[in-house]
Amino acid sequence: MDNNHEATLKYHEQEWQIKSGMTIRHAIEKVGLDPQSVLAIRGKKLINHQTLIEPEDEILLVNVVSGG
Amino acid sequence: MRCQLCGEVAVISMPQHRLKLCEEHFPAWVERRVARTIESFRMFSPDDRLLVAVSGGKDSLALWEILLRLGYQADGVYIHLGIDHEGYSDRSQSYAEAYAETHPEATLHVVNVRERYGRSVPELALEGGRKTCSRCGMIKRYLMNRMAREGDYAAIVTGHNLDDEAAQLLQNNLYWLRGYLQRQAPVLPQTHPGLARKAKPLCLVAERESAAYTLVRGIEYIQQECPHSVGATSIFHKHILNDLERRSPGTKLQFYQGFIRAREDGFLAGTDETPPLEECAQCGQPTSANALCAFCRMLETEEP
Ligand code: SF4
Ligand SMILES: [Zn+2]
Ligand SMILES: [Zn+2]
């Protein structure tokens, strides 16, 4: 299998391999998260949800909904 | 997606404001919004010394940063609650301290509940047979007010954001908690010489904007949640409001601002049920209880 086009999406302890070429928003929905509740970071930089995922990207999702 | 002000790549889209901004214009926009909020609700003036309730989380550190950038005199207070699960309290304290170290113009006060009173907040709650969060809330309010009094601060400022306020408002409305509705406001004036004014300068900043702000400004904060917040009703209510927001951007803002306007127009007049305040015989803090305040009563009855 050719993994070159895959990117990694991380959220807390979870990790998913996703296809490049789709938007961050699409990827967030695909793994079952709510785009309203997370922000995406690539290389320490905040990136908008319309950003297209590039091959070998490592994208970190940060939860924004806190309680208490 | 491009910044509407300069055409650079946008870092965030805010459909409720019909606005997309880059990493330079977004934080500046947040700072201006907070400056306007402070002025329009007459929260405090540049002469006032402020005490920021710092938890080490995104909102309180964002608030501290914004206040300092706007030129306010803002010190912080961190209350170590003694929550040891995965080192939560120690870790959040280190984020608060790391921030303070890079801002020598501001002082961080640390109050360690276990060191000062012999047991942690969860232990105090257990001894008194109370829910941890309700005890925790009372203890934090007490200690913050005491710090404000002792340090002669004009106001306590907290990092409550729009989502916190909207979720609280939903909760208060669902159960028609009249006293809470009466007291839910962007700024609570001093009602007694011993009770500090309280203000929430981030009340019109959405939670995702506040998180985005800390990320863009490069502020490190604790992402781990307090273990006691798992399953909190407020989180559930926030998700409900986010659902509404997705369908109809601006709902949260409208809900909260509509309430504030109604409040200012006197819609809630006559429902204030706050009893007159006396001074606690032990510590002197204002209290509605007889003789001892809730905090001193807790210490009295729950000796280690
Ligand atoms: S979640 Fe509960 S215990 Fe934890 S800090 Fe908030 S009020 Fe305190
Ligand atoms: Zn711009
Ligand atoms: Zn007392």
Image (cartoon, rainbow, N blue to C red):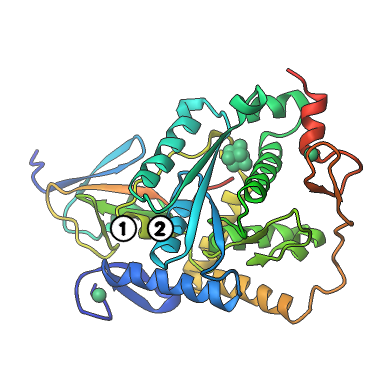
Closer to the camera, B93 or A54? B93
Residue at mark 1: chain: B
Q: Judge whether residue B173 can be spotted in this image.
A: no
Q: Earlier in the sequence, mark 2 or mark 1?
A: 2
Quadrant location of the N terminus of chain B?
bottom left
Amino acid type at circle 1 is Arg
Closer to the camera, B31 or B144? B144
Crowdedness near tag 1: few (<14), some (14–19) or many (≥20) residues, C-alpha within 10 Å: few
Q: Quadrant of residue B6?
A: bottom left
Q: Are marks 2 and 1 in contact (CB under 8 Å)?
A: yes
Q: Judge whether residue A45 can be spotted in this image.
A: yes
Q: Secondary structure at mark 1?
A: loop
Amino acid type at circle 2 is Glu
- From the top left corner, tell me how far across and down residue B67 is, in percent: 45, 62
Is residue B97 toward the left or the right of residue B144 in the image?
left
Give the vertical position of B245 relative to B89 (above or below): below
Q: Quadrant of residue B227?
A: top right
- From the top left corner, tell me how far across and down residue B210 is, in percent: 43, 59
Task: Give the residue at mark 2.
Answer: B65
In the image, are marks 2 and 1 on the same chain?
Answer: yes
- Residue plotted at (32% across, 74% down): B20
Closer to the camera, B152 or A12? B152
Mark number displayed over residue B217: 1
Quadrant location of the C terminus of chain B?
top right
- Residue plotted at (34% across, 71% down): B28
